[in-house]
Image (spheres, helix red, strand yellow):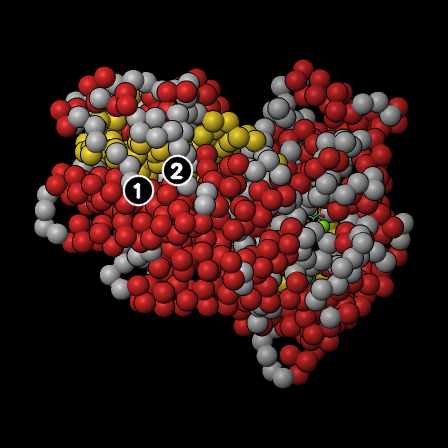
Amino acid sequence: MNAERNVSATSAAREILRRLHDVMATKAGAQAKLNRVVDIVAGALSSEVCSVYLLRDGVLELFATRGLAQSAVHVTRLAVGEGLVGTIAKTREALNLAEAKAHPDFAYKPETGEESFHSFAGVPIIRQETAIGVLAVQHVDPREYADIEIEALQTTAMVLAELISSAGLVDDQTVQQARERESRPARMTGLKLVEGVGRGQAVFHQPRVIVEHTVADDIEAERARVYAAFQMMREQIDNMMGQADFAAPGDHDEILETYKMFAYDEGWSRRINEAIDTGLTAEAAIERVQMKTRTRMRATKDPFFQERLHDLDDLSNRLLRIVSGQMDTAAKRGLQQDMILIARNLGPAELLEYDKRFLRGVVLEEGSLTAHVTIIARAMGIPVLGRVKDLRTTIFEGDPLLLDAQRGALFVRPSEPVVHQFEEQVALKARRQAEYAKLRDLPAETVDGARITLMMNAGLRSDMEALDITNADGIGLFRTEFQFLVSATLPRRERQTQLYKAVLDAAGDRPVTFRTVDIGGDKAVPYMMGDTVEENPALGWRALRLALEREGLMKVQARALIDAAAGRTLRLMFPMVSEPWEFDEARALVEAQLSRMVARGHPVPKKIEFGCMLEVPALAESLDLLLPRIDFLSVGTNDLTQFLFAADRANPKLADRYDWLSVSLLRFLKRVSDQARAARRPVTVCGEMGGRPLDALALLGIGIERLSITPAGIGPMKAMIRSLALAPLQHEMEGWLRRGINIRTALTEYASSRGIAAG
Ligand code: PEP
Ligand code: MG
């Protein structure tokens, strides 16, 4: 393209917008306005033809033209996908052809009289991410239009979209129908972060902004708005970088760095300003530039470049939200029905803002197994699928979704058979739940009269509802670090006291075992740990190791717990104890706080019971020393197995490698359990293992009588326990463990042949 034509095209774009502005301001009817628009565009782009096609009754109808036969207006109609116009609507991509007839999709419409034209360019008219029409120009000469001319067409299409919707030429129902036709069912895959299934409508955490006004009344005012929006966005990003209320370091830092680079990128703001210069509003200018980014995103094959463009797209959305004042997340608007939440990433506190009654699942473009949002969602029982690509381009707000995080799949606009299969699965689950509900008031007692203590794990105030629903025997593990994970700063003592008190009040006379903060490892809290980078965080400065060093933290927590449990029994346990002296130190620290509070006349608990978590294998070798000093023991099989097998619990590749029912783990646990029984100290298993009926069956078989599990597991577990004769199983287990046979196979056969509900 020569320089001269470039300059004239730029001024053409500006001229078009100026004149469109006048057209929009007149009181003329919609058809008259459309007629004016095609005149203006044809004139400005020196084209013989300019036409507007709009969707009516599912087909694209010629609504206005200059250059084609006027008798074809409201007569010529093309299906979506038919001819060049139909192709543009279908693909939502521009076409720019020197020789229209040479294109395989060309369809000749004789009534238009278009045979004399060679070149053709067209762009989609888009409303709510759906093509509602096409704007096209044609020329007798076989020449391709310049990029800048195509951009002028795209800008005009944006203005037309506004005109069309405000005049009601294409109504919402048509848009909806077009969208349904356009969008086929899709199956997307990702990384299962929290297993489970869910069904609901797609809701974007950050809803897309719909640009209502495209033509500026006052260019200087629009420029000022964009300037202010850029300032605010830069501040937000700087804050995000400083605050790190996000997941584990790694991916996220990189994204924030890229955000920052773009936020301060002169080129980007210049392009937006140039678009404003042509007469667009701030919103339209941002979207205009964003369209270009998207086109480049689709065109590039380089994944790295694609990723960066994706970040820029994300940031454009943020800028749009800022400039239009539409900053609210979907949580602020509230969920009204079952929803699946879609986001690039989420902080744990953001997840908690959603109404749990309607939140059926979460789908993230990023996400990792150790991110706080994953840990919290797991505790809430909300399925999460992560690392799903192209969410924004495949899913529309309100689309029906089926999330099968069990198999790592998301079905978008699912077909009938898929829905049917899903419904059957859900119905089966519901029938089972109804059966479990009937067991609520019955004891967790085996057929031969052994009473198993069945408690639940918790970590959020909202978890306490489940205590009444499940009628569990108490809270066997309250993960106090959750409060730390969901806040951006260290929770103050008053807030800690409030939470612990609320938990104890909700539990009534049922016991609650609080575990002191278990931070570090998979639960990194940047505001406490600084930017320490550890090679092996699971083996690093975490849990009690960190807490004993950060004495202030532990003291504050001890005081909060003592305060909250005043007049009641406080059950306290310490995580990741590796040697007995660590327990001694932790206990001494708590007792010192107790004495201090007594001396100051503060009300204190009537009793404190101290327990210890067994998660580090070494501790099992000093149980003879430890047991006399503690009131109870709790086995954290999640960490214990990762240390015993030297297999990172957060590494998905290792997730299914070692069986929880391995002879080594069960022998190990049996030794611990026997030794504790001999010392008359109760042992609870509080890791995930205890929540699976078959695994729990093995635990009962080796003599464990207390389980603390996820609330959803209580019903199935009670059903299993109530169908079991314990003594014969324990006898069998002895033999199996001695012989070292495959326990899972043996146990599965044992359960099915005796009608034990462990499936
Ligand atoms: C465990 O390690 O088994 C445990 C219960 O603690 P967490 O999962 O919180 O590390
Ligand atoms: Mg643990």
Which quadrant of the rendered structure holds the C terminus?
A: top right
Q: Nearer the viewer, residue 189 or 222?
A: 222
Query: What residue is drawn where x is 85% and y is 64%?
Result: 581
Residue shown at the point (76%, 68%) measured from the top left: 548
Q: In which image quadrant can residue 480 be found?
A: bottom right
Residue 11 point in image, percent of width and height = 33, 53
Q: Is residue 402 left or right of residue 520?
A: left
Q: Vertical placement of 654 versus 166: above or below?
A: above
Q: Secondary structure at mark 1?
A: loop
Residue 145 badge: 2
Work out how far the residue at label 1 is from the one at label 2, CA to CA, in angstroms: 9 Å
- N-term-proximal mark, 1 vs 2: 1
- Residue that mark 1 sits on: 45
Q: Residue sitting at 81 percent across and 47 percent down?
A: 676
Q: What's under tag 2, amino acid-wise?
A: Tyr
10 Å crowding of disc 2: few (<14), some (14-19), many (20+): many
Q: Is residue 524 visible?
A: yes
